[in-house]
Image (cartoon, rainbow, N blue to C red):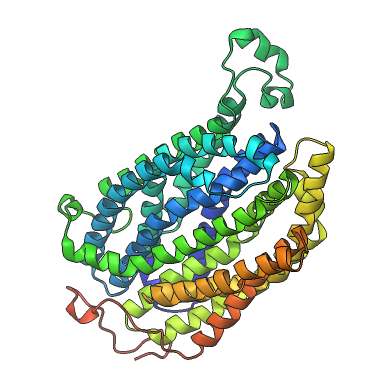
């Protein structure tokens, strides 16, 4: 890992940036594959099953976001201690993050499971949606929350290794988990009775001969959640084994897992703004979902499907943003703020360019892309496809701005300025998006088209605001006191011109 670390803090910028970024993109692509697999198979059940996922996801994300903020804190601190050559402190922070988030995940799982019914009952819904969709969403969420600790386990493992400069190992573990989920999804959703997987493979007769009328009937939307739960469990076990029993990532000793209030306080101080950032994002999604839920099922399904597709094209920007997080963190830990700033400029330019290409593809092929995820060709399904294609085309306007905003937020987080990242996330969501959606969809009476336009404006506003603040240059300060670390890096000259 020393060569990887030195590459991040020395020499050229493009190679380490993209070496960090592409495994993150693949890992997040695999993350989306969980949702895509669920959507594909549930789309074979009904549009109501897809709409149930649309309703459930924002509520689930609210709980996941709380723990996710603290994994960001662990990643930031590990990156800065690694850049400062303080391996002992990096291992201590990694151990404390593992322990703290494991405890937090169990608590959130209990709260999430118990609050599922009351939370769904608060959503204003169209009568059709209330009858067809809400019961399915509740069924999915209750099973999903049982697996919350497993999901958090992989998230913290991935974040700690990313801060250390290793993004390939989490990618490999994620691949294993997704492969398992894809294999389990059709079995748990449909069982062994008229399973569309057997039909697609031309094995319907074999299915009948092997399982007959007594075969497992499947669990529907709950089966999709159970498949995710089990595959996340495998990822957590493998990840914890690698970080605790091998030389992968920072060295974590058994004593590093015992709670240390001073270390936990540092994690909490940096993590709370990130948790708030992700939580307010989730609350914005819930607010938007509550607005969308007042529309018919086809609009709700198109909204959820469109969001999943946007989350897919969002991945290059996310990868560059998280790579920027590590680049900035390690270089500020190594006392090289100029190099950190140049990495941000490079990443922002690359992010905008890549996302423009993605936008062009999405604009040209919106309808066939959306149609892949709807198995039916009923009138309602065709309406869903048309609305989803319109949504995707409108949102292509914001794609380049997504690339810039994600890189800038990564820079602020990598510097430990999680409050700044929180502020601009709130600008994007609570100034640029939520009120605009309400104003266009309801006040201006533009209906579904107003929702689509409002959703697209958020990242445009956020990117412009974050970019103007970045130019002030006040963000370049480490949260780690490198002078007090056991083995600080001492260099006469930075090859890039930094003393």
Let me know if residue 2 appears in the view.
no
Report the residue at 19% width, 75% height from top.
Answer: 485
Q: Is residue 36 left or right of residue 112?
A: right
Q: Nearer the viewer, residue 295 or 80?
A: 295
Location of residue 277 with respect to 107 vertically, above or below: below
Report the residue at 32% width, 80% height from top.
Answer: 478
Report the residue at 17% width, 73% height from top.
Answer: 486
Q: Position of residue 192 (x, y in %)?
A: 61, 18
Q: Quadrant of residue 316?
A: bottom right
Location of residue 257 with respect to 346 vertically, above or below: above
Q: Position of residue 442 (x, y in %)?
A: 71, 63
Q: Is residue 96 left or right of residue 231?
A: left
Q: Position of residue 347 (x, y in %)?
A: 55, 75
Q: Quadrant of residue 477?
A: bottom left
Let me know if residue 20 appears in the view.
yes
Q: Nearer the viewer, residue 352 or 102?
A: 102
Q: Position of residue 189 (x, y in %)?
A: 59, 28
Q: Nearer the viewer, residue 190 or 25?
A: 190
């Amino acid at each position: 890992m020393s060569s990887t670390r030195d590459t991040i803090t020395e020499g050229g910028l493009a190679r380490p940036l993209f070496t960090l970024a592409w495994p993150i993109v693949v890992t997040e692509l695999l993350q989306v594959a969980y949702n895509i697999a669920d959507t594909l198979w549930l789309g074979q059940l009904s549009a109501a099953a897809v709409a149930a996922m649309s309703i459930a996801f924002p509520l689930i994300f609210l709980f996941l976001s709380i723990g996710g903020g603290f994994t960001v804190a662990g990643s930031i601190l590990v990156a800065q201690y690694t850049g400062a050559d303080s391996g002992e402190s990096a291992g201590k922070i990694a151990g404390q993050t593992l322990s703290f988030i494991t405890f937090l995940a169990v608590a959130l799982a209990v709260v999430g499971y118990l609050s599922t019914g009351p939370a769904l009952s608060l959503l204003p819904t169209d009568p059709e949606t209330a009858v067809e969709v809400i019961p399915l969403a509740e069924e999915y969420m209750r099973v999903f929350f049982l697996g919350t600790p497993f999901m958090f386990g992989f998230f913290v493992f991935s974040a700690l290794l990313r801060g250390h400069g290793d993004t390939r190992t989490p990618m490999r573990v994620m691949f294993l988990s997704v492969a398992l989920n894809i294999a389990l999804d059709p079995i748990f959703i449909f069982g062994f009775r008229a399973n569309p997987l057997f039909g697609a493979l031309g094995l319907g007769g074999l299915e009948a001969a092997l399982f007959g009328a007594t075969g497992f009937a499947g669990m529907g939307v709950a089966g999709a959640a159970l498949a995710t739960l089990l595959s996340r469990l495998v990822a957590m076990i493998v990840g914890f084994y690698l970080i605790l029993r091998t030389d992968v990532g920072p060295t974590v000793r058994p004593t590093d897992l015992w709670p240390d209030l001073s270390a936990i306080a540092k994690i909490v101080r940096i993590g709370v703004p990130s948790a708030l950032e992700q939580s307010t994002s989730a609350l914005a999604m819930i607010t938007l979902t509550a607005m969308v839920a007042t529309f018919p099922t086809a609009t709700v399904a198109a909204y959820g499907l469109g969001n999943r597709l946007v989350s897919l094209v969002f991945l290059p920007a996310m990868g560059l943003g998280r790579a920027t997080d590590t680049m900035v963190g390690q270089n500020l830990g190594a006392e090289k703020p100029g190099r950190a700033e140049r990495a941000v400029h490079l990443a922002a330019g690359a992010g905008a360019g890549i996302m423009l290409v993605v936008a062009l593809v999405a604009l040209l092929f919106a309808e066939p892309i959306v149609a892949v995820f709807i198995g039916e060709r009923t009138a309602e399904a065709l309406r869903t496809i048309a609305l989803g294609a319109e949504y995707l085309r409108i949102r292509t306007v914001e794609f380049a701005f997504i690339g810039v905003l994600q890189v800038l937020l990564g820079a602020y987080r990598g510097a430990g300025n999680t409050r700044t990242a929180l502020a601009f996330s709130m600008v994007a969501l609570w100034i640029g998006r939520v009120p605009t959606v309400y104003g266009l969809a309801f006040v201006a009476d533009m209906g579904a088209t107003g929702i689509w336009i409002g959703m697209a404006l958020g990242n445009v506003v956020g990117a412009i605001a974050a970019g103007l603040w970045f130019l002030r240059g006040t963000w370049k300060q480490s949260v780690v006191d490198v002078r007090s670390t056991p083995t600080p890096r001492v260099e006469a000259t930075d090859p890039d011109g930094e003393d």
